[in-house]
Image: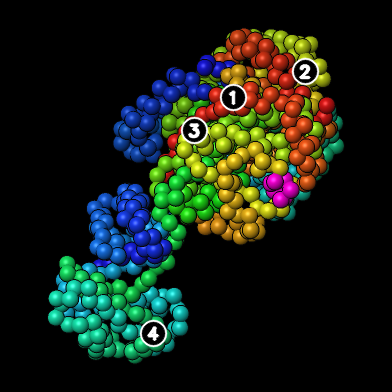
Amino acid sequence: MFDIVLVRYGEIGLRGNNRRNFEDKLMANMERALSDIPNHRIYRTPGRVYVDAGGDANPVLERLARVFGIVSFSPAVRVEPEMDAIKDAAEYVLRDSIANRARLAVEPGAKSTFKVESRRADKRFPLPSPEISREVGAHLLDRIGGDVDVHRPDTTVNVEVRDEAAFVYARVVSGPGGLPVGTSGKALLLLSGGIDSPVAGWMGLKRGIELAGVHFHSPPFTSERSRDKVEDICRVLCRYAAGKIRLHHVYFTGIQKAIKLDCPEEIRVTLMRRMMFRLAEQLAKRIGALALITGESVGQVASQTLASMLVINRVTAYPVLRPLSGMDKTEITRIAEQIGTYEMSIRPYEDCCTLFLPRHPKTRPHLDQVESAEEALDIPALMTEALDRTEIVDIRG
Amino acid sequence: MDCSYLDNSATTPVYPEVADLMKTVMVEAFGNPSSLHGKGREAERLLNQARERVARVLGTNSRDIIFTSGGTEASNLAIKGAARAYRKRGSHLVTTRIEHPATLRAVEELEAEGFVVTYLGVDGEGMVAPADLEAAITDETILVSTMYVNHEVGAIQPLGEFSRILKSRGRRPFWHVDGVQAFAKLEVEPYKLGIDLFSLSAHKIHGPKGAGALFVREGVRLKPLLVGGGQEAGIRSGTENMPGISGLGLAAEICWEKSREGMNHLADLKQFMIERVLEDIPDAQVNGPGDKRAAPYITNFRFKGIKGEVLVHALEEHGIYVSTGSACSSRQHQASYVLEAMGVPDREAEGAIRVSFSTLTGREDVERIVAALPGEIKELRKFSRVR
C-alpha cells in the first residue's frame, strides 16, 4: 500500500535564485541513490518531490536517508482524489500506525489518539480542508475508535489532495538534512585510514561538497592492504557522495626517508604534515578543488595543537576545513559507526608507518626551526617525485 | 611481472594436473559416494582411489585414512577426539611450545575441560629434547602431540627418539604427530614409529585448500567432532568433499614423487642461499638449525634492525614473496611465539622472515632473493630505530 514517498527539503528552499539549480542537483542525487531500484520514478510538483517506489518502499526509504538535502520524508498511500478512497486510505494508515506503536510497545494497552490534518492544493476539489479533516476523522472514529486529540495526538493522519492524486500518510522520517552534494563545489579530503578523516569527509558531503580524496602511502613501510582499506572507506563514503570519489594514492616514501635522514627528530611530524599539505594543494589545483578537508580535532595529538596547526597551515593558501575540530573522540567514533566507516578504520594495518614517528614529537614547533630544517630538503624535487608516482583510482559506491 | 613465490609453507599453487582432475570431479563425476546408483559408485571409486594414494605415500593401510577439511580439523580431531575417548585412562597430555595454533588451541580447550597439560620447551634451534619428553610422561599421560617439521623454522623433530621413548613405556600414551609441513616431502612411517595419529593437509603440497586427512591407526578410538550421516567410518560425518579429496590424493602422489627426486636439489639451494646471505649481509642469522636437522624447504632468517613486515613488502617490489613467521600469526602484530620459545629476544624476532621452497622452486628464484636482500636490508637499516 505504501508505494509512494513524499520528500521534503528545507534549507534549499531558502536560496532564491539558485533554487532551481539546488532542486536539480537534489533530484539528480536522488536518482543516483535509487538507480538500482527497478521501476521507481521520481517526479516533482512545486515545493514537493515524490518517489514512486514501484513496489516495496523500504529500500527507497533506506537510500533516501543518505541523500543530503532531504529534511524528511513520508511513506504515503496514493489514491484517486475522491472522498471514499481517501477515507479507506486513512483507515489503512491509522491501523498501520497503531500496529506499529503496539509493536514498539510505546504505551502498551493505552488508548490511541489521533487527529487528521488536510491540505487541499487542488482548489477544484469540492470540499475545503477543514471539511475533509472532519469527514475523514468521523470515518476513523466510526471504524477504528479511539479519541481525537488535536493538541498531542499519538498519530497525525495527513491528507494531501492534489489534482492528480490524493496522498495519505502518518509517518514522518527525518532525513539527513544538509545540502545536496555538488552544490557547494569540490574539496580534497586527506584520508589516513583512521577513524577521523572519513567522518570529516562525510561532514563535508553534508554541506554539499563534492569530494576527491588523497592518501599518502609509503611502500614498503606501509602495506598494500592499507591502500585497500582507504579504498574500502571511500566506497562507503560514496553511498553519501552521489557519485564517484577520485582517490589519489601519493607516493610518500621518498619524502619520509629524506625527512628521517636529514631533519631533527622532534619536528618530523610537522615537516611531514607540511609536505602533505603542499602536495594536497597541488592536487587540489589540478582537479579544481577549492578547499582541503582534514580529520584534525584540536589537541588530539601533537600535530593537532593550535601551535602545530599554525606552522603546518603556513604552506597553503587554500582554506583547510576541519569539521571535527570541536568534537571529542567519542562523538567522532559514534558518527563513524553510524555511517559505517568505523569497522574499516580499525583494521590493523599500520598507516603512515610508525617507524618514522619520533618518540617525543614537539607539541609547539617554531616556524623558524621548521623552515630552517626544510632547507636540508630539496622540496621541489621531492614533490615532483611524489606527484609523478601518484596513482589515481576512481571509487564508485 | 614474473615472480618468485617463496612462501610455500603458507600455501602452494595447485598442480595443473590436480586442478584438471578436480574440475572433472566437479562437473562430470559429481556423484555422492553414498548414492546407490552408478553416479554414486563412480564417486565412491574416486574416493577409494584418493584414500589409496594418500595411504601409499604414508606407507599405511587405506582403511586408516580419514578425510577432513584440512590440517586444522585433522589435528583438532586427533587431539580432542583421542583425549575425550580415553579420558577414563588418564587426564594428562604432553605437547610442545612450538606446535601449530591448531594443536595449541585444541589442547587449551581440553585444559578448560579439566585435562592437565605439560608443554615441552625447545632449545635455541627449535628442537625438543627427547629427555624432556621422557621426563614429562607419567602413568596418567594419555596423549602426546608433537610436530614433525616446525612451520616457522623448519626444525625436524627427532621422531625416532620420541618413538623409542614411547615404545619403552609399559603403559603407552597415544601419539599424535602434526605432519602438515612434512607429508609428501619427508619420509615417515607411522607403523614403524608407532604413530597413532598423523595430520596432513592438501594445500601445502600443491593440492586445494579445504582438504586434509588424519591417519588413525587401527584400533584407536576417537570421539567425533562432527556427527551426522556417519561418513568416514562414523568419525567424520558430512558428505565427502570429493573435488578436494581427489585433489589431495593426486597432489600427494605427485608431490611425493617430485620430492624424492628433488629434495637433494632443494637442500643444495638452501645451502647456497644461507651461505650467500650470511656472507653478504652483516648481522644476519639463521633461526633454527642451519644444518640437516631442518627441512630443506624452510629457512628462517633474522636481520638486526629490520622489521620483518617491512622487508616482506620491500621484497614484494622485486616480485619475491616471503613471509614473517607463519601466515597465521603474521597478521597479528606480535613477535612469533616459536622464536620466543627458542629464546630469541623480541626485538630481534621482529626482524624475522621465512623463506619456504616447494618442488616448483628453481635456482633462479633463489638467485633472485639473494641478489635483492643485501641492498634492501642496507637501505631499510638506514631508517630503523636501532641504528
Name the quadrant containing residue A383: top right
- Looking at the rendered image, the quarter that the C terminus of chain A falls into is top left
Q: Do the residues indicated by labels 2 and 3 lie within the same chain of the protein?
A: no
Q: Do the residues indicated by labels 4 and 1 lie within the same chain of the protein?
A: yes
- Counting from the top left corner in percent of width and height, residue B342 is at 81, 31
Magenta region: A303-310
- Counting from the top left corner in percent of width and height, residue A21 is at 33, 52
Which residue was labeled with disc 3? A286
Q: Amino acid at mark 1?
A: Thr
Q: Amino acid at mark 4?
A: Pro
The Cα atoms of the two marked residues, 4 and 1, are separated by: 66 Å
- What is the secondary structure assignment of the residue under circle 1? helix
Name the quadrant containing residue A112: bottom left
Residue A225 drawn above or below residue A114: above
Q: Is residue B248 left or right of residue A359?
A: left
The Cα atoms of the two marked residues, 4 and 2, are separated by: 83 Å
Main SS class of the magenta portion in the image:
helix
Viewer-nearest of labels 2 and 3?
A: 3
Which residue was labeled with disc 1? A384
Q: Amino acid at mark 2?
A: Gly
Residue A180 drawn above or below residue B291: below
- Residues under numbered marks 2 and 3 in contact, where contact means CB atoms less than 8 Å apart: no
Which residue was labeled with disc 2? B290
The mark that comes first in sequence, 4 or 1, is 4
- Counting from the top left corner in percent of width and height, residue A103 is at 41, 75
Viewer-nearest of labels 3 and 4?
A: 3
- Residues under numbered marks 4 and 2 in contact, where contact means CB atoms less than 8 Å apart: no
Q: Is residue B92 visible?
A: no
- What is the secondary structure assignment of the residue under circle 4? loop
Q: Is residue B132 left or right of residue B294?
A: right
- What is the secondary structure assignment of the residue under circle 2? loop
The mark that comes first in sequence, 3 or 4, is 4
